[in-house]
Amino acid sequence: MAINPEKEEYELQYFNFSSEELVAQNIQMVQSLLNKSLAVFTEQLIQKQKIPDDPATRLRAGCNKTAIAIYNDCLPAMNNLNALYRKTFFIPDNVLLPTDLLQTRGYTEELEKSLEQEVLTAKDAVMQGAVFLASLEAEMELHRELEPCYEAEEEIVELLKDFQEEEIDADDVSDLVKRLEIAGIIVDGSTQESEVELDNFLLQK
């Protein structure tokens, strides 16, 4: 079974164990037990049989080699046991948290920060666009409210144009001036000055 170093590293960091780590620990434990058992058995044999120092030393030196040979003989059973460990303690990919998928995909912290900055920039652009649109909508609403005023102003201008184009009757103006003088609304001036002012007024029209 191929080992995925990134997945194993994640499992060790997040779950504090991995199937491959348990397999390695199991192999180490079996080898250690074989070595210790064989060492104890050898010492008991030396004492019971009262083996001399030189042969005893040779027996002790061969313990490690013998333990390896015993382990190799047990390899089929060990392989079955390791397969059981892998099957029992395998962690499926779907139990990984979404935020932790960055590690399994090899994303770097710099890339993640860069993506976060892009998101913030996009959010700022959206907010600025929203503010601009709100300001534009307010301005358009103001124009809609002022539109009746514009129309009324155009009507007044048209009326003024119509009044300016109408002919003024000099007799009517003179009669109006006399009535105003009689009513004391305007001060009575000299006849000649009044006629000159009236003529000037009529010429302007």
Image (cartoon, rainbow, N blue to C red):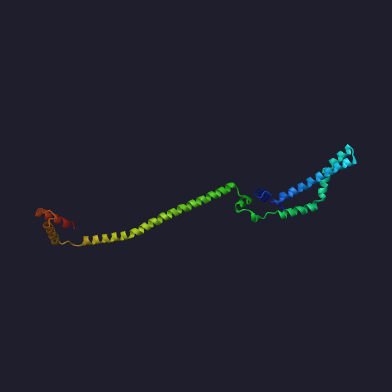
Q: Say left or right for 8 vs 119.
A: right
| Residue sitting at x 22%, y 61% | 163
Residue 188 figure quarter: bottom left
- At 89% across and 42% down in the image, what residue appears? 48
7 sits left or right of 51 in the view: left
Q: Position of residue 171 (x, y in %)?
A: 13, 61
Q: Nearer the viewer, residue 111 or 68?
A: 68
In the displayed structure, does residue 20 sit left or right of residue 59? left
Residue at position x 74%, y 48% from top? 25
Residue 185, horizontal then vertical, whole percent = 14, 55
Q: Furthest-top residue in view?
A: 53
In the image, 118 versus 60, the foreground residue is: 60
Q: Position of residue 132 (x, y in %)?
A: 43, 53
Q: Quadrant of the C terminus?
A: bottom left
Q: Quadrant of residue 140?
A: bottom left
Q: Nearer the viewer, residue 175 or 11?
A: 11
Looking at the image, residue 52 lies above or below residue 75 = above
Residue at the extreme front of the image, as rendered: 48
Residue 51 location, x and y as percent?
89, 39
Name the residue rendered at 33%, 60% in the picture.
Answer: 147
